[in-house]
Image (spheres, rainbow, N blue to C red):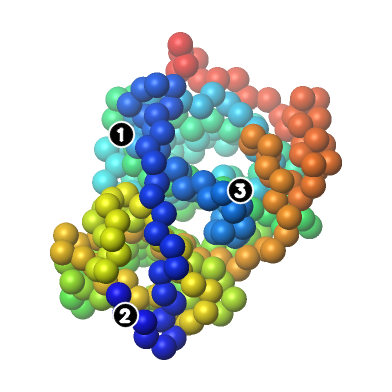
Amino acid sequence: MTTTPGIRPVIETIATEWHSFRGGASGAWLLHPADLHALDPVVIVDHFRMSTPTFPPHPHAGFSAVTYLFEDSEDGFVNRDSLGHRLDIGPGALHWTQAGSGVLHEEIPRVPGRVSHGLQLFVNSAAADKRSAPAVFHRAAQEVVALDLPGGARVRVVLGRFGGVQAFLGAHTALTLLDITLPAGVVLDVPIVAGERAFAVVVRGALAGVPAREPHALRFGDDGDAVRLEAGAEGAHLALMAGRPLGEPIVPKGPFIGNTPADVTEMVRRFQSGQMGALAPTPGAFN
């Protein structure tokens, strides 16, 4: 890929290694940068393929756990949480759990044995929002606008702005998430707002001039007003994300993200004292 004024270059290609959960067929290609600020405001991304119940009810606090299912998922998830929600996340849908001061949730395949294919993102919250009341946002597949562009490119505007489409949930950390499919050789320029950081998870194929095998991730430079995506010989399917960095200290401890060690100690105390609510496992799911 050549350097063009205004176009943000790819500054890093990141191999994402497969990690099996509980030793089974379910697992994820992990994008867990050593530098926790590399994708700020996103902290980590799991590109998963799940067909079995894997994670019993567990807490989160200080960030948002965001699940997006690709349209090629054989089936979806059922999401339950300690706020009393029970929602289906079908193929092509997005579910955003804004944990705030703390919430428990469980996501299990709607039909065990059928593969759910998607992303889970940990989107950080600013210090001022880490003790806010938890909230849930949901976007069904039919609510996501898909744009079919000249040359065969297809863009699902899951979150953010693109091509005149606006998609916002009301979460306190704003994020752009575009699900992009490109035929071989097709070029697509995606505007990026000044001051936002951009990266992509390549689900299938590769971009021209990027020497990487699937799946992998790409980090773009912070200078410029667009990223240029040119599909390689096999085409490409990728999820492009962008957001304004929070620029705050990040202290993780398991399912909690604080700004200081004292923050996460307090989160653990709230969980252990029952202040994040209660949620029993789905009967029989984890036997």
Q: What residue is rendered at 51% in x and 46% in y? A: 32
Give the number of callouts.
Answer: 3
Query: Gap in Å between the C-alphas at discs 3 and 1?
Result: 24 Å
From the viewer's perspective, tell me whether residue 214 is left or right of residue 283.
Answer: left
Query: Gap in Å between the C-alphas at discs 2 and 3?
Result: 36 Å
Residue 69 location (% of width, % of height): 38, 46
Q: Which residue position is annotated with label 3?
A: 64
Q: What residue is rendered at 60% in x and 20% in y? A: 280
Q: Looking at the image, is 245 positioned above or below residue 279?
A: below
Q: Which residue position is annotated with label 1?
A: 115
Q: Quadrant of residue 257?
A: top right
> Which numbered disc, 2 or 1, marks the residue that appears first in the sequence?
2
**Amino acid on which disc 3 is placed:** Ser
Q: What residue is rendered at 33% in x and 26% in y? A: 25
Q: Looking at the image, is 12 positioned above or below residue 196?
A: above
Secondary structure beneath dot 1 equals loop
From the viewer's perspective, tell me whether residue 247 is left or right of residue 115.
Answer: right
> Which numbered disc, 2 or 3, marks the residue that appears first in the sequence?
2
Q: Which residue position is annotated with label 2?
A: 2
**Amino acid on which disc 1 is placed:** Val
Q: Looking at the image, is 125 positioned above or below residue 47?
A: below
Q: Looking at the image, is 88 positioned above or below residue 159?
A: above
Residue 196 location (% of width, % of height): 56, 72
Residue 135 visible in the displayed image? no
**Amino acid on which disc 2 is placed:** Thr
Residue 212 location (% of width, % of height): 29, 56
From the viewer's perspective, tell me whether residue 62 is left or right of residue 146.
Answer: right
Q: Quadrant of residue 207?
A: bottom left
